[in-house]
Amino acid sequence: MLVEFAGHHGDGWQRELAQAITDPGQLLEALALDPALLTPALAAAARFRLRVPRSFVARMCRGDARDPLLRQVLPLGEELAEVAGYSGDPLGEAAANLAPGLLHKYRGRALLVTTGACAVHCRYCFRREFPYDAQLSGDGRWSGALAAIGADTGIEEIILSGGDPLALSNARLAALSGSLAALPHLRRLRVHTRMPVVLPSRVDAGFVAWLRSLPWPTVVVVHANHAREIDATVAGAFARTRAAGVQILNQSVLLAGVNDDEEALVTLSTALFEAGALPYYLHLLDRVRGAAHFEVPEARARELVRAISARLPGYLVPKLVREEAGAAGKTVL
Ligand SMILES: *Cc1c(COP(=O)(O)O)cnc(C)c1O
Ligand code: SF4
């Protein structure tokens, strides 16, 4: 279960984060939606809490219960259905744990779970039941992971993930990158974050300074699923990131009722490019308990990618991938 933020103060993005909507009633009211949605929303939120920043809600259409942005965050009764094949750890991540907080599944790349906190709770998130508390407890919580990375010179790239690593303060990011900089075999840094999309004010001057300070070529992989997520504030956050010399890639999840049509995917790719990001992966849904209603059949997914490939330049077509427990990398379809 994703953990909650402790202690909200400071200004700018931290205040915005603290003011995120977590009460389903408030979300329905803000968007003038049918109050009948409340009872199922409360039941589903009891399992995995609602969380959405107000600036993201502002990009949704009032009165539209099928809004593609809303659908990613609104708890629904469907989440409570037990569906065969959907589990709490669909990727077998528990088995890939090298040290607390470190996942090493693929050659040369290790993923560091830096925090369990996120600015938004995506209903389809495959880590909605991830045991963050066990992973992150105690002081010096990265020391085991850092020691394991230091001991394995085959690791060339560190992926900061979570949760959302940008939930950490700039000071904590600097402390972490400082420790990593002491390991001479690291050649690249990657940051997997949804914050530039859902809370663009997070890309503040201190964060940009941190990016500039990094001793490695750096990639920021953002996460947007629909073109309407990308407004001028998001494009601004991307531009500030790029000005620090950082490449931006985007990963999406193919989600029924959000982006499972040709037009939505074409528009997403072009909007990303215009904002300064290249499409990277389009993930088939990971079969996590509570997300079965987002499933798009693989045959339909392939058909969609064929259709957009016929309309877009190759560099705007994301790779359709699935994650399989035990595989050497994402499976490209
Ligand atoms: C997705 C993932 C990566 C990165 O894979 P790329 O194909 O390099 O983007 C690395 N480690 C884990 C555990 C992952 O799930
Ligand atoms: S931001 Fe990423 S980790 Fe956080 S809930 Fe959404 S998909 Fe999951």
Image (spheres, rainbow, N blue to C red):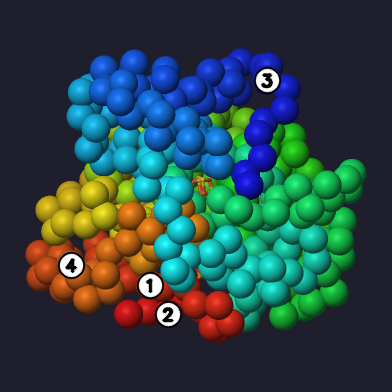
Please name the amino acid that badge 3 sits on.
Answer: His
Is the residue under label 3 in contact with that under label 1 (CB below 8 Å)?
no
> Percent x, y for residue 52?
46, 30
Residue drawn at 22 percent across, 57 percent down:
260
Q: Which mark is residue 304?
A: 4
Is the residue under label 1 in contact with that under label 2 (CB below 8 Å)?
yes
Please name the amino acid that badge 4 sits on.
Answer: Leu
Q: Residues within 10 Å of mark 2 (few under 14, many from 20)?
A: few
Q: Which residue is mark 2?
A: 331
Q: Which residue is mark 1?
A: 321
> Percent x, y for residue 148?
83, 69
Q: Is mark 1 within 8 Å of ligand 1?
A: yes
Q: Seen in the image, is 188 located left or right of residue 225?
A: right
Q: CA distance from mark 2 to mark 1?
A: 5 Å
Total marks shown come to: 4
Q: Which mark is residue 8?
A: 3
Is the residue under label 2 in contact with that under label 3 (CB below 8 Å)?
no
Question: Dividing the image into four equal quarters, which quarter contains ligand 1?
Answer: bottom right
